[in-house]
Image: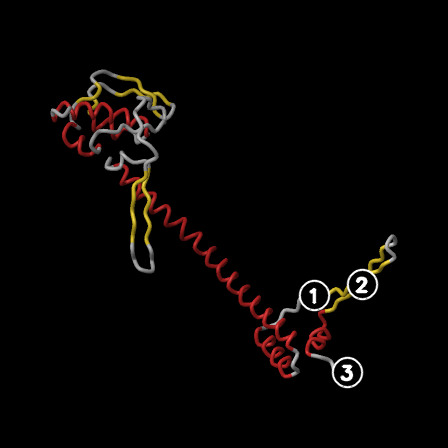
């Protein structure tokens, strides 16, 4: 009987051995050929598929079509992995740039009422999105040891600093704790100087509390 297209593929050398197992209790043996995967090009598989179609070996055609599909998916996976590896370095570079910009925005004091912000840009349609994030309304504890306890109910810090930033906040030398370290704030330190002294969340909120009281008194708001 003439060899089929599938026989030809077996005869090409992908059978590398066989193993035999005999079960003593069941008096049964099992033999299995050991094969290795043949690395073929897309052109070779297509040529084998044409040969199988001419021989009306449709089972082999189906297997070859599956091989082509597997090859295409492997190429896509490889391209995706290479792109992700390339983008990893670009992402780190972009993050550093955004971190620097985020710090500049935070330093303005305009975002003191938020816990963070989220930004997205779609390169396809060039649309952008931005929103501020906030977990919950909190009241200041007055602790500047590193806790973030935002003082709500006042305008943005920049607005208040523009009005009363030059007013004195500390009339005497004062020892405070910032980031678990003691600092001495000199007598005569203004609200603006105190605000710029540290961007620690607890410290900024302590300044904001006093700043808000001074602003309220200056504007006559109750």
Circle 1: element type: loop
* Coloring basis for residues: secondary structure
Local secondary structure at mark 3: loop
Name the residue located 77 percent from the left edge and 63 percent from the top edge. 32
Q: CA distance from mark 2 to mark 3?
A: 24 Å
Residue 31, label in figure = 2
The residue closer to the viewer here, 88 or 11, is: 11
Of callouts 2 and 3, the N-terminal one: 3
Q: Which residue is mark 3?
A: 1
Q: CA distance from mark 3 to mark 1?
A: 26 Å
> Which percent across, then down, holds residue 214?
17, 23
Whole-percent x, y for residue 172 in the image? 22, 15
Q: Badge 3, how many Cα within 10 Å: few under 14, some, many 20+?
A: few
Evaluate if marks 3 and 1 touch, with contact meaning CB atoms under 8 Å apart: no
User: Residue drawn at (32%, 22%), measured in percent from left and top?
Assistant: 141
The quarter of the picture where the N terminus appears is: bottom right
Tell me the number on the disc at residue 204: none
60 to the left or right of 152 = right
- Name above or below for residue 84 compared with residue 203: below
């Amino acid at each position: 009987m003439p060899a089929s297209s599938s026989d030809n593929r077996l005869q090409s050398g992908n059978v590398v051995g066989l193993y035999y197992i005999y079960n003593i209790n069941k008096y049964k043996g099992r033999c299995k050929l050991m094969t290795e995967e043949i690395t073929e090009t897309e052109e070779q598989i297509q040529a084998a598929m044409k040969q199988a179609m001419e021989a009306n070996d449709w089972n082999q055609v189906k297997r070859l079509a599956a091989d082509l599909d597997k090859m295409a998916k492997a190429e896509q996976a490889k391209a995706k992995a290479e792109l992700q590896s390339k983008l990893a370095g670009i992402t780190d570079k972009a993050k550093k740039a955004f971190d620097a910009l985020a710090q500049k925005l935070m330093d303005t004091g305009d975002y003191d009422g938020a816990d963070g912000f989220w930004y997205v840009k779609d390169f396809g349609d060039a649309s952008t999105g931005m929103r501020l994030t906030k977990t919950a309304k909190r009241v200041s504890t007055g602790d500047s040891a590193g806790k973030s306890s935002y003082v709500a109910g006042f305008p943005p810090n920049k607005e208040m600093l523009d009005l009363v930033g030059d007013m004195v906040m500390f009339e005497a030398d004062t020892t405070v704790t910032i980031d678990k370290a003691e600092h001495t704030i000199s007598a005569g330190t203004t609200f603006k100087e105190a605000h710029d002294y540290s961007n620690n969340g607890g410290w900024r909120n302590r300044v904001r509390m006093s700043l808000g009281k001074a602003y309220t008194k200056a504007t006559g708001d109750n």
